[in-house]
Image (spheres, rainbow, N blue to C red):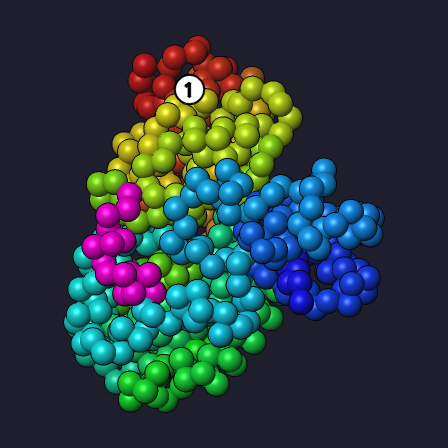
Amino acid sequence: MTKIYVPLDSSAVAMGADEVARKIHAITGFDVVRNGSRGMAWLEPFVEVETATGRVGYGPVTLDDVQTLIEDGMLEGRAHPLCHGLVEEMPFIKAQERLTFARCGITNPLSMADYETHGGLAGVLKAVGMTAEAICDEVITSGLRGRGGAAFPAGIKWSTVRGAKADQKYIVCNADEGDSGTFADRMIMEGDPFLLIEGMVIAGLGVGATKGYIYLRSEYPIAQEVLTAAIDRAYWKGLLGDDVMGSGKAFHLEVFMGAGAYICGEETSLLESLEGKRGQVRAKPPLPALEGLDAKPTLVHNVISLCAIPTILAKGGAFYRDHGMGKSTGTMPFQIAGNVARGGLVEKAFGVTLRDLVETFGGGTRSGRPLKAVQVGGPLGAYIPADKLDMPMDYETFMGIGAGVGHGGIVLFDDTADMAAQAKYAFDFCAHESCGKCTPCRIGAVRGSEVMAKVIAGEEVEANLTLIEDLLEVMEDGSLCAMGGMTPVPVKSVLKYFPEAVGRETGREAGKGGD
């Protein structure tokens, strides 16, 4: 029987995928496989049909298109204005290096048999035969750095938790994905949930943890549904439970729903929330690796970090390390959004240029107007001007210009964007989302917004810009966490690269008294 695939991914569902799937089933009588998304958001709902030569894709398919597509031979993979040919040959897909997202959009997310057929469980089956130290060594060899934004070496975290003495240790997955323009966590949780589960189990074996939590943002109901069902199946398979894959070691896992606070993406604030308290940042030390959840050693990683682990164990740390460049090893799922022609997810090894991502994959601006800026790394990321698109995407290069890769979000702005307003927005965002625990963040963001409003109004521009620069220094040096500490990043980038937007002569960069 012909297999038809319609994504259950949130982006596809938002565009009518559920209705399209029901109509295809009603007309054909065939069961429709609800797969994850391939990451081509501009084509959602993206319908795939399995043919003798491979899977053929059609999209974006609306409810009104279904009858005509079927009549015109969609079930046989025939040509149509909405047909994109063999999916694996589409340039957007073919040019990627998919390690973490290798299965996403291909398999049935809730079929363990499908998962195994496509290479799943290879990592954990290898891990159960290794010592905890050997597992940690593979992570160290891989050079994996945290994909949540801080880019901290994962192997150091693992070794610290493994070496800590305690009667209980935890693995906590930070799935509170809240940065603008980011959706990689959601996409992998909805499209390949067993990968995250397997990664957390391996982490448990590596550091001696027997309990895990996925802290999931409340705005992801489909991810919650898929993860909950996948965890049930993982217990049935023996991937979770008191005897993980016959190893004699236990690992239990559950989903915890957050309440929508951006600050809970910060690991200590997340732990406070997980303990049932108000989501506020903790002072460090002690580090969560030594005193985290319930004051026990806790390995906190974001979704993509944990999802890289099965590949590292299955194929070896050296295999993963050989992708990327310098200290930026492996691949990164870059998410392209904003004013873009072809928004979506692109997994590439570090070293790909911003231009390749924005132009080759993204197709430039959706408006067709010239590109003015690209914000990389979420709402607290730097605004990169169009003349710097040839920079390689890696941690060190971005750090060198006062920017960051962050969670891999890339948001495009065309030449109509008001960059002064974007600088003010950084302060407004911080003021709205601050946990309020430290003065530089709580007060600094409010005062920054007020002073930036005066700059925009043309009031004593230079004096007020000098005041803002002083304020940014205080926030950067004195804030308790990255919320206040990184709010200066987008503001500084506007002052540096778009001085005319704030009434300064072109060419003058930010910095006290600096030309």
Measured from the top left, where is residue 107 in percent x and y?
A: 53, 63
For residue 488, say whether it is visible: yes
Q: Please identify the dominant SS of the magenta region.
A: helix
Give the residues drawn in magenta, as a range.
Answer: 310-324
Q: Secondary structure at mark 1?
A: helix
Query: Looking at the figure, which quarter contains the N terminus?
Result: bottom right
The residue closer to the viewer here, 236 or 369, is: 236
Measured from the top left, where is residue 222 in percent x and y?
A: 62, 64
Q: As shown in the figure, which amino acid type bears the numbered disc 1?
A: Asp
- Tell me the residue at 43%/31% (across/down): 356
Query: Looking at the figure, which quarter contains the C terminus?
Result: top left
- Residue lying furthest top in this view? 505
Instruction: Determine which residue is flagged by label 1.
Output: 387
Please say whether residue 412 is one of the residues in the magenta stretch. no
For residue 12, say whether it is visible: no
- Tell me the residue at 77%/67% (across/down): 29
